[in-house]
Image (spheres, rainbow, N blue to C red):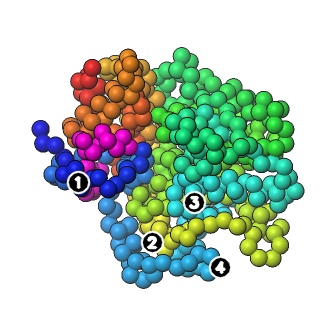
Amino acid sequence: MTRDAAPSNDLDHLWMPFTANRAFKADPLLLASASEMHFATPQGRRILDGTAGLWCVNAGHARAPIARAIAAQLETLDYAPGFQIGHPQAFAAARAVAQVMPARLDRIFFTNSGSEAVDTALKIALAYHRARGQGQRTRFIGRERGYHGVGFGGISVGGIPANRAAFTGALLPAIDHLPHTHVPDEQRFSVGQPGWGAHLADALEALVTLHGDTIAAVIVEPVAGSAGVLVPPEGYLERLREITARHGILLIFDEVITGFGRLGAATASAHFGITPDLITLAKGISNGTVPAGAVAVRRDIHDTVVDDAPPGIELFHGYTYSGHPIAAAAIQATLAIYRDEDLFARAADLAPLFAQAVHGLRQAAHVVDVRNLGLMAGIELAPRPGAPGARGREVMRACFEAGVLVRVTGDIIALSPPLIIGEDQIHTLTRVLRTALDGVA
């Protein structure tokens, strides 16, 4: 077997994110190029991308229209400051994003990542309540097993213990959490949304009773991606929307993963028919080509913050690279591909075949649950006694050796292919995964 390795001294200087650095550098998996549905290793082996990179390359790799737009922009205007001065591309990109957001969520604040988008949304929520005379609303409600990036705001409202453990002494103080929605005994092997669990949203009523009118916002992922594809029960998001609206609490949907076609619509909000007050975006917004993120804000929230402020800066927040010209060009070119190739509808059309294929793994070795929605799926494995996560890692590496990239979270295999995937490639993805599952102890 040919290993895709490199001399150790070529790897030493980089401290890799969310990586077991010692184990990786002892036996690295490297990617050198990409095109459409495939990566390639330094040795030229093709790897079918079953994860859209990291949930972000929704239109497939190395798309020429995006590359041309980036190159042209780089030669025209490489950078422009965004504080007290602007450039046309940022305004055009904001207009393009607004056009695919739910009605009236048409005020766009650009960031550089999903983590920054979450922290921005939390700040906007605080600013809004203060502007409307409810400055006591400073508390945020997240959810267990939620992932909202790695800023201190994001890990405070997030609910993945490992992401919080080393930083607990510095997290935001006014935080509480809803219970997560995944109850295997009631939901195991659900195809699409589980029928059981809408009542779990009622835990928010108890938090309102406890905290009174101090809650500024509730933030949830419509589908929890990083925790292993946890699909909301039927009626759950509807109840959250009703409860938050009734108590004057803002509802933030973190759509960094679900935005831009993953569920067969521009947003999960559109898929579910539920409109929150703010939506955080990143990943697919630029097809992963340039770091970019955004917050889509309900128009009246923007107007309350801006119009009620004294003369001068209305919101003391922003980034050096907010609305960066290169990112703005990439965003516009990416959204044009989604539109011109009708990729959101394509994802919706492929979703039933994808569901059938992933649920065909139900009888594969070690599988204890399969869950799916749109073009995303989680295949949960029984952990190896005394070695949680080891089986998942071995399956991931076996798939890579066989020419398929999957993502692993503990003992959960996550699939989220580019929206351009074909039927044969869906079957290849699940066939290789089944072989890998059957081949590990």
- Front label number (1 vs 2): 1
Instruction: Using the rendered view, name the quadrant where residue 413 is placed.
Output: top left
Residues at marks 1 and 3, CA–CA distance in whole angstroms: 38 Å
- Chain-order first, disc 2 or disc 4: 4
Quadrant for the C terminus in the image = top left
Pinpoint residue 287: horizontal percent, then vertical percent.
42, 58
Q: Is residue 10 left or right of residue 89?
A: left
Horizontal arrangement in the rendering, residue 145 relative to residue 44 (left or right): right
Proximity of marks 1 and 4: CB atoms separated by less than 8 Å: no
Q: Position of residue 156 (x, y in %)?
A: 63, 43
Circle 1 residue:
9
Q: Which residue is mark 4?
A: 84
What residue sits 38% from the left and 28% below the top? 389
Say what amino acid the circle numbered 2 marks. Answer: Ile
Residue at the far left in the pictured view: 1
Q: Is residue 50 magenta?
A: no
Counting residues from the start of the chain, the first of labels 1 and 2 encountered is 1
Is disc 1 placed on a helix, strand or loop?
A: helix
Q: Are marks 3 and 2 in contact (CB under 8 Å)?
A: no
Q: Amino acid at mark 3?
A: Ala
Q: Looking at numbered disc 1 in the image, what kind of residue is underneath it?
A: Asn
* Res 321 visible: yes
Read off the residue under disc 3. 294
Element under disc 3: strand
Q: Which residues are magenta?
A: 19-41
Circle 4 residues within 10 Å: few <14, some 14–19, many ≥20: few
Compared with 275, 329 (above or below) is below
Q: Quadrant of residue 35?
A: bottom left
Sooner in the amino-acid sequence: mark 3 or mark 4: 4
Using the image, tell me which numbered label, if any, was put on residue 326: 2
Return the residue nearer the eye: 375 or 279: 279
